Amino acid sequence: MSDYSWSIPQAQNHPNILFLWLNLKILVAETGRIRSLTLQFLSGTYALPSTTLDVYSRLLKLPNVRMVRIMGLPSLMPPTLDELRVPLESQVEVALPHFRSCELGEYAHVGRSLHNYLARVAPNHSLTAQFWPSAFRTGVTIHFRVQLGNGNDNSDLATPLSVAIETAFASSPALLNGFLDALPLDRVHALHLTHDPDGSGQVPADPSILFPLRRLIERLPSVKHFTIERWLPESFKLLIPQADLHSRDPIPLARLQTIDLKEIPMGFTPASATRESLYRLDILREVLRSWDLPRRFMKNVHFVDCDITDDEMQELGLNIMVMKDCFRAV
């Protein structure tokens, strides 16, 4: 098996189309052996020349690939995504850069192509969206995962699609909205907020992170299970927009049933010259009550490996079941 990385140059004006064509032919001959393929669309590329399109489409039939990475200009991603044929067990990573000069329709087109890709590889699967910020907080990643078997074992999960989104989209929210609106987010039944494995292990209340997450949460009508892992409680207030019971607007995560809180830091928030320290249990109480009140399907909250006592769980004052599997027994 082999790894390949191929940058698509300014092919429309490429000085040596024959070289480009031969390069593609060599790759196509190796498709059965390709384990990993990276495709990068360089700035200034408009389209592949017509002489290479047929060969390029054959390159994208990859029966044994494990990883495909696609990056570059959004306008050039849809033709590749529309032709891509890989096994469900493969992972496709799309890096979605922020280009202020790009039009709304270009990002929406990428979203539609990803929608169609998931419909091809996992037509009958519900999705889990796993979200984490990058270690340097310059972007976030959404992993769309599916259950391969009939059980609930996490080891039997496949991740057919991951999308990396730059936090710079906060300056162009319409572009991000257009992209997210085109994704099949109604198929997402579980949402998992976690941390970058290369990061520090705890996720702070950073507005640059919360902007794309809130935009995502507002578009998840079918989520029933919500897991939050190693996020600071002070960030919870900003996760889900407060629901107005008298408004006709849709309630975010309206079908939510269960919440798992894993390894959530407790104690007190850090104090500063302009901000006093807050008791994180008080923050949790306020947030969980606000989440429970407008959502009629809510059943339970489950604390996993959190430093919380039975008495403190009672202090939350929730009308739903509160359970724990934590390291403090009393």
Image (cartoon, rainbow, N blue to C red):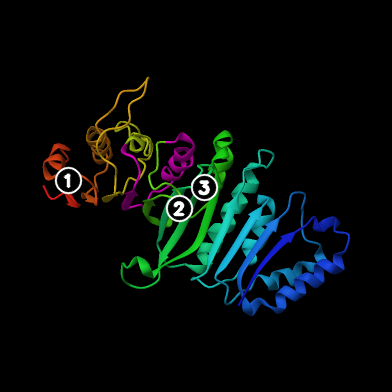
Whether pointer 3 and pointer 2 mark residues with C-beta atoms closer than 8 Å, the reply is yes
Q: Secondary structure at mark 3?
A: helix
Whether pointer 1 and pointer 3 mark residues with C-beta atoms closer than 8 Å, the reply is no
Which label is found at residue 320? 1
Q: Gap between marks 3 and 2, in whole Å?
A: 8 Å
Q: Gap between marks 1 and 2, in whole Å?
A: 27 Å
Q: Which residue is pictured at 64% across the width and 67% down the height?
A: 83
Task: Using the image, determine if residue 227 lies above or below residue 18.
Answer: above
Q: Quadrant of residue 240?
A: top left
Q: Amino acid at mark 3?
A: Leu
Q: Gap between marks 1 and 3, in whole Å?
A: 32 Å
Residue range highlighted in magenta = 206-233
The residue under label 3 is: 180
The residue under label 2 is: 185
Q: Amino acid at mark 2?
A: Leu
Task: Using the image, determine if residue 194 lies above or below residue 160.
Answer: above
